[in-house]
Amino acid sequence: MNIHPTAVIDPRAQLDSSVIVEPYAVIDGPVKIGPETRICAHAVVSGHTTLGARNTIGSFATIGAPPQDIHYKDEPTELIIGDGNQIREYVSIHRATAKASGKTLIGDNNMIMAYCHIAHDCIIADHVIMANVATLAGHVEIGSHANLGGLVAVHQFCRIGDYAYIGGMSGIGLDVPPYVIMEGTRNQMRIAGINKIGLRRAGMDRETIKCLEEAFKILFRSPELLLKDSLAKLEEEMKDCIEVQLMVDFFHSSKRGVVKRTIDD
């Protein structure tokens, strides 16, 4: 184990023998840290926090601090982070409240750039990119391969679907469906279309992308159809496309409502 002599390690912490802890880092509480994870200088990891393998926690990051919730009464809630995540300088990720599952969850292979904030009870899937200063309020859910531009702010309880791309400085107040490009703030939120470039880069085949583009036209460019009729049409006519059905399910499961306006509206 490579621990700098100026680092402070709580005796309750459990660190794999391959963990690296740089100068002046603090490990406070019953923290668990997996193989080949690096805690950079001046970072703080605290509370009931579990880090998997091959993570990097940047300098001055604060990982596992109590939630910023006035109702929190020091319950033993958790922050669980998977494998292969890059969490850069000054990022803050808070453990959960006792209101939901009691866990803030971060998946695998995510890039959380400098100064981002992930609040209590958030769920981040895999291969997510959050550019600098992107901010998530409590209970937000981010799907796999989603990409949030710099200074994006997401309202509590919102969901962002798989492969969605959110333009920088956007303010998200409704659920953003999977596979789309979106930008704007609050009542100016607009969807530009299917995130074709992102889907191609992720290796999605042309036929599937074509199906998603057709589904987009039915959902967003068919003013003669009510939303429920558009969804029913997709369920019937494109039932063999898994990705389209995931989009349909996203609409059906929304509690806050889904962004429907496009840049042409």
Image (tube, grey):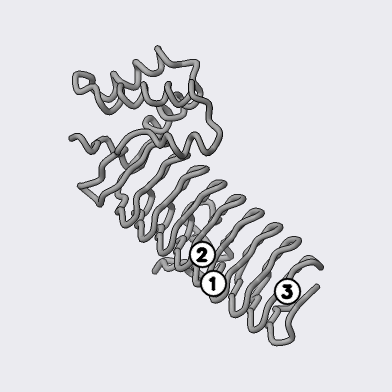
Q: Position of residue 113 (x, y in %)?
A: 49, 62
Judge from the rendering whether residue 71 lies leftward or rightward of residue 93; answer left or right: left
- Could you tell me which secondary element the residue under label 3 belongs to? loop
Task: Kindly report the distance in space between the C-alpha atoms of the residues bearing marks 1 and 3.
Answer: 21 Å
**Camera-side residue of 152 and 68:** 152
| Image position of 8 with respect to 74: above or below | below
Q: Identity of the amino acid at label 1?
A: Ala
Q: Which residue is mark 3?
A: 12
Asked if the residue at tag 1 contacts the one at tag 2, i.e. Cβ–Cβ closer than 8 Å, the answer is yes
Local crowd size for mark 2, using a 10 Å CA cut-off: few (<14), some (14–19), many (≥20): many
Q: Earlier in the sequence, mark 2 or mark 1?
A: 1
Task: Kindly report the distance in space between the C-alpha atoms of the residues bearing marks 3 and 2.
Answer: 21 Å
- Circle nearer the viewer, 1 or 3: 1
Q: Identity of the amino acid at label 2?
A: Ile
Q: Residue furthest top?
A: 237
Q: Quadrant of the N terminus?
A: bottom right
Q: Identity of the amino acid at label 3?
A: Arg
Local crowd size for mark 1, using a 10 Å CA cut-off: few (<14), some (14–19), many (≥20): many
Identify the image quadrant of residue 88.
Answer: bottom right
Task: Kindly report the distance in space between the C-alpha atoms of the residues bearing marks 2 and 1.
Answer: 8 Å
Judge from the rendering whether residue 128 lies leftward or rightward of residue 137; answer left or right: right
Q: Earlier in the sequence, mark 3 or mark 2?
A: 3
Q: Which residue is mark 1?
A: 61
- Circle nearer the viewer, 3 or 2: 2
Q: Which label number is shown at residue 93? A: 2
**Camera-side residue of 259 and 88:** 88
**Camera-side residue of 65 and 243:** 243
